[in-house]
Amino acid sequence: MIGSEANKKTSQTGSNSNNIDNGLPALQALLSDKDRKIESLLLEIEEYKSSVDDLNDIIDGLKHTREKLIQYEKLSALGRFTADVAHEIRNPLTAIGGFARRLQKKLDEGSREKEYSDVIVYEVQRLEKILKNVLTFSSDIKFSIKEQNINTILESALVFFSAICGESSIKVEKTLGDLPPVKIDSDQVRQVFDNLLSNAIDSMPDGGMLSVRSFTEFLHNITYIVVNVTDNGEGISEEKLDKIFEPFCTTKEIGHGTGLGLSISRKIMEEHCGFIKVRSRAGEGSSFDLYFPYQSDEEAGKIQCWEFSKCNRDCSTDTSCPAYPNYGRLCWVVAGTYCEGKVQGTYAQKIENCKRCSFFKKVTAKEI
C-alpha cells in the first residue's frame, strides 16, 4: 500500500509539472502582449503630450501676435492723429520762428526784449525738432537698402559725439569687430546710433564710461550683426523699463527730449527685420543691443522660403515676399516664430511653430 501511494503522488507531481511547463509559453505570450500594449499606450500618451505642447505653443504664439497687432493698431492710430496735429502746427510755428529771428537781429544786445526773442527762437527750434520726430514716427519710412559695413556708420557717429564726450568727462571705450557687410539703410541706422549715444551721454551728467562694441552672434540658427552701447549712468528703474519704447515716454526732465527717440529706433530696427534688447538698473547704467540679421550672398543665391513653399500668399511678385524680401532664407527670425516684431509674421502668415516647417528643418540641417 505504501509503495502504491508513493507512486500515485509521484505521478500527480509529474502531471502538475507538465501542466506548468505547457502553460509557461501561453503565460509568456500573454505578458509579452501586455507589454506591447503598454508600450503602445505610452507612445500614444507621448504623442498626445507632444500634440498638446504644440497646440499650447500655437496658442501662445497667437496670443503674442494678437497683442502685437493691438499695439500696432494703437500706434498706427496715434501716428495718424499726431501727423495731422503736427501738420496743423507746423505752418504757424514756422511763421512764429521766422518773425522771432527777424526781431532777434534788430534788437539791442543785453535788452530784455532781446532775451525774450532768444527764448522764443530757442523754444521754436525745440518744437520744430519735436515735430520732426513726430512726423518721422508717424510716417512710412522710405528705405534705401544697400550692403554696407556697420562699423563705418558707427565710427562716424562716434566722431560726431567725441567733442561732447570730452566736454562731459565721458571716456569712450570702442571695440569694433571684423564684420561682414549687411543690408541696411545707412541714414536710418545712423539715426538709431545717434539716439542711443545721445541718451547714454545724457544719463552721465557728471561723466562716466561709454562702451561701444560691435560683433557677430549666432542666435536662432542664424548669424546676427550686433552693436552694443553701454553706459554706467543713471540707469532706468524696473517699472519704467517696460515702457521706454512707447511713444512720448521719457526718463529725462521736461524740456530735455521728446520721448520719441527709442520709439523711432525700434521702428527702424523692426523695418530692418532686427530688434533691440535692453538691460538696465537704476543707478547702475544701461546696455542696449541692436541685432541686425545677416544673410550671406551665398545663402541669398539659394532657394528662398516662398520658392520652396510655393505659398503665393502675400507675394507682390513671383520672386519675393513683402514681409522679408531681403531675407528669404531667414524667414523664421524675420517673420516667423523668432520674429520680434510678429506683425510681419502675420502679414506673411508665419504664425505657426517654425520648428515644424519643412523649410526650416532642411535649411538648418544644411540639406538645401
Image: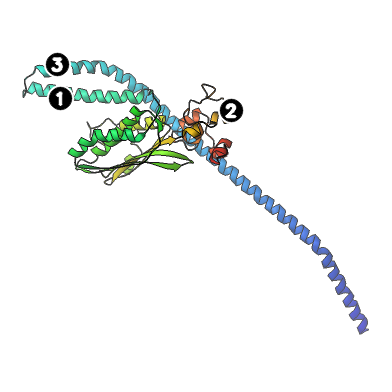
Distance between mark 2 and mark 1 Cα atoms? 62 Å
How many neighbours does mark 1 have within 10 angstroms: few (below 14), some (14-19), or many (20 or more)? few
Of all residues, the one furthest to the bottom in this rendering is 2
Q: Which of label 2 and label 3 is nearer to you? A: 2
Position of 120 with respect to 249 (left or right) is left
Q: Relative to 341, is 357 on the left or the right?
A: right
Inter-mark Cα distance, 1 to 3 = 14 Å
Callout 3 secondary element: helix
**Residue 227 image-quadrant placement:** top left
Of the image marks 2 and 3, the number of the one nearer the N terminus: 3
* Label 1 close to label 3 by CB (< 8 Å): no
| Mark 2 vs 3: CB contact within 8 A | no
Q: Which mark is residue 102?
A: 3
The front one of 75 and 104 is 104
Q: Which mark is residue 310?
A: 2
Q: Quadrant of residue 104?
A: top left
Query: Which kind of residue does numbered mark 2 sit on?
Result: Lys
Vertical placement of residue 210 versus 152, above or below: below
Residue at x 27% of width, y 39% of height: 200
Viewer-proximal residue among 178 and 214: 178
Which of these two is toward me, 179 or 97?
A: 179
What residue would you read off at disc 1? 119
x%, y% of residue 238? 33, 43
Whether tag 2 and tag 1 are in contact, CB under 8 A, the answer is no
Q: Which one is closest to the eye, mark 1 or mark 3?
A: 3
- Assign a secondary structure to mark 1: helix
Could you classify mark 2 by the number of other residues whose Cα lies within 10 Å: few (under 14), some (14-19), or many (20 or more)?
Answer: few
Q: CA distance from mark 2 to mark 3?
A: 64 Å
What is the number of the mark on residue 349?
none
Point out the tag, 2 or 1, that comes first from the N-terminus: 1
Which amino acid is tagged 3?
Answer: Arg
Question: Mark 2, mark 1: which one is toward the viewer?
Answer: 2
